[in-house]
Image (tube, rainbow, N blue to C red):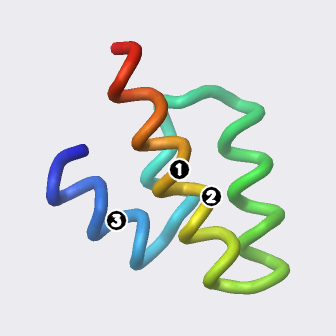
Amino acid sequence: MSLFRVLLAIIFPPLAVLDAGCGSILIVFLLTLCGWVPGTIAALVILNNTNQFG
């Protein structure tokens, strides 16, 4: 995870997972609508998982 991606996940979570796929963006966007904290946590988890495999 780069520092820029982490900061982006904290500020606007859906934008941080833009290259992770349409499903990930949708999930993070919906969680962000429910609250900032769930969206941020989901974005950080997705960023952490994609970097392990890529």
Alpha carbon distance from label 1 to label 2:
5 Å
In this picture, is 41 found above or below 46? below
Q: Secondary structure at mark 1?
A: helix
Q: Please state which of the two labelled residues, at mark 3 or mark 1, is closer to the viewer.
A: 1
Alpha carbon distance from label 2 to label 3:
13 Å
Which label's residue is closer to the chain start, 2 or 3? 3
Contact flag, marks 2 and 3 (Cβ < 8 Å): no
Q: Which residue is mark 2?
A: 42
Q: Which mark is residue 45?
A: 1
Q: Could you classify mark 3 by the number of other residues whose Cα lies within 10 Å: few (under 14), some (14-19), or many (20 or more)?
A: some
The residue at the point 84 percent across, 80 percent down is 34
Amino acid at the residue labelled 1: Val
Return the x and y of residue 54 as percentages of the image width and height: 34, 14
Q: Secondary structure at mark 2?
A: helix
Return the x and y of residue 42 as percentages of the image width and height: 62, 58
The residue at the point 78 percent across, 67 percent down is 31
In this picture, is 30 found above or below 10? above
Q: Please state which of the two labelled residues, at mark 2 or mark 3, is closer to the viewer.
A: 2
> Which of 41 and 16 lies nearest the eye of the viewer?
41
Amino acid at the residue labelled 2: Ala
Return the x and y of residue 8 as percentages of the image width and height: 34, 65
In this picture, is 15 found above or below 35? above
Quadrant into which the N terminus falls: top left
Alpha carbon distance from label 3 to label 1:
13 Å
Q: Which residue is mark 3?
A: 8
Return the x and y of residue 13 as percentages of the image width and height: 52, 64
Amino acid at the residue labelled 3: Leu
How many discs appear?
3
Residue 10 image-quadrant placement: bottom left
In this picture, is 4 found above or below 31? above
**Seen from this angle, which residue lies furthest top?**
54
Contact flag, marks 3 and 1 (Cβ < 8 Å): no
